[in-house]
Amino acid sequence: MAATPRIGIVGVGRMGANIGRRLHETGYPVVALYDANQSVADEVARELGAELVRELARVTAASDVIITVVTDDAAMRKVFAPTGDSLLTGAAGKIFVNCATVSPGIHVEVERLAKAAGAQSLEACMASSISQARAGTLYLMCGGERSAFERVKPMLDKMSSSLRFVGKAGEAAKVKALVNMVMNINTAGLAEGLGLGESLGLDLTMLREIFAQTGANSRVLETDGEDMQNHDHACFFSAAHAAKDSGIALDLAHDAGLSLPLAEATKRQFDAMRAAGLGELDKSGIAELTFASRRSAALRT
């Protein structure tokens, strides 16, 4: 692989586009972009001087490293299909870096398919949001063969401020599922605390300040508390993704024979947001279901 490998990106949404911008400004040639939403991808391609391609195989042909940031398990299976238009076509010698939050078994499956095609695959699960992707300060949890990790580590260092190799394929995805499960539970709990505080007539700024100095403190309080109070849910991590990721964790719990009532209740809340048409709000929008002054309007949306 070249000292500065050519980069292709599949999935040019909020995270994929900002990863591309970060790599471009740090000297990595971003040469090919693919996204189901052609208009969004076209804008980013022009910005980065990349080719906007309509076939997955073309991304692989043009690139040394292919980063995927797709939506879910079905999308991963589609882009790594064993037949038809696929990233696996002509993939010998290439390496795939898969950043989306998908089921651990999908990463194992993709690694097997990549090996059969003469390529390598690495999961690089992101525990950060859009602004961190743009700044190159992601927290990345990686899984796969150690040789694949070392091969792309210089690039990953440009994308992240903290980098952790977890183990074999699927292991990083398990950790990421648990990270997001706990984060989502904390988000739902904070929304309930602030919602109850509002109903009790408490000053929410004062309440957040006290939370921050007590056992009620959390990273979610720092990132979402003010937004919940101010009814500001510009999307950094969507409620729809929160529902999906909680579902991945619950599937793992089911396989392990565990009951996780808090995770189940949290997923129901995010599912309720999606059902109400609020799935593209930031996860902080769960407050719209717990503040009495807003709940009726949210559920009528």
Image (cartoon, grey):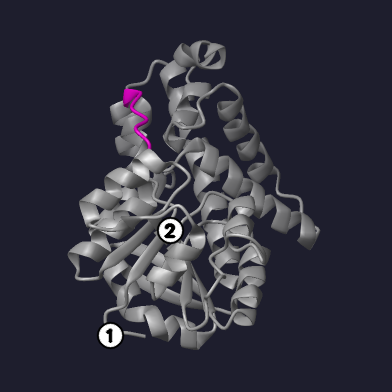
The answer to which of 149 and 132 lies nearer the viewer is 149
Local secondary structure at mark 2:
loop
Relative side of 77 to 217, left or right = right
> Magenta residues?
230-235
Image location (x, y in percent) of residue 130? 33, 49
Of the 4 image quadrants, the one containing the N terminus is bottom left
115 up-or-down from 218: above or below: below
The answer to which of 225 and 201 lies nearer the viewer is 225
Q: Disc 2 marks which amino acid?
A: Ala
The span from disc 1 to disc 2 (Cα, nearest Å) is 27 Å
- Which residue does the image show at 29% across and 28% down from the upper left? 205
Local secondary structure at mark 1:
loop
| Residue holding disc 2 | 127
User: Would residue 268 be seen by someone viewing this image from the given angle?
Assistant: yes
Image location (x, y in percent) of residue 39? 36, 39
The main secondary structure of the magenta stretch is loop
Task: Check residue 209 for magenta coloring.
Answer: no
Q: Nearer the viewer, mark 1 or mark 2?
A: 1
**Residues packed near mark 1 inside 10 Å, few (<14), some (14 to 19) or many (20 plus):** few
Check if mark 1's residue and mark 2's residue have beta carbons within 8 Å. Answer: no
Image location (x, y in percent) of residue 204? 34, 25
- Which residue does the image show at 54% across and 84% down from the upper left? 145
| Residue holding disc 1 | 3
The answer to which of 253 and 291 lies nearer the viewer is 253
Tell me which corner region of the image, top left, top right, bottom left or bottom right, holds residue 200: top left
- Which residue does the image show at 46% across and 27% down from the upper left? 287
Q: Disc 1 marks which amino acid?
A: Ala
Of all residues, the one furthest to the right in this rendering is 257
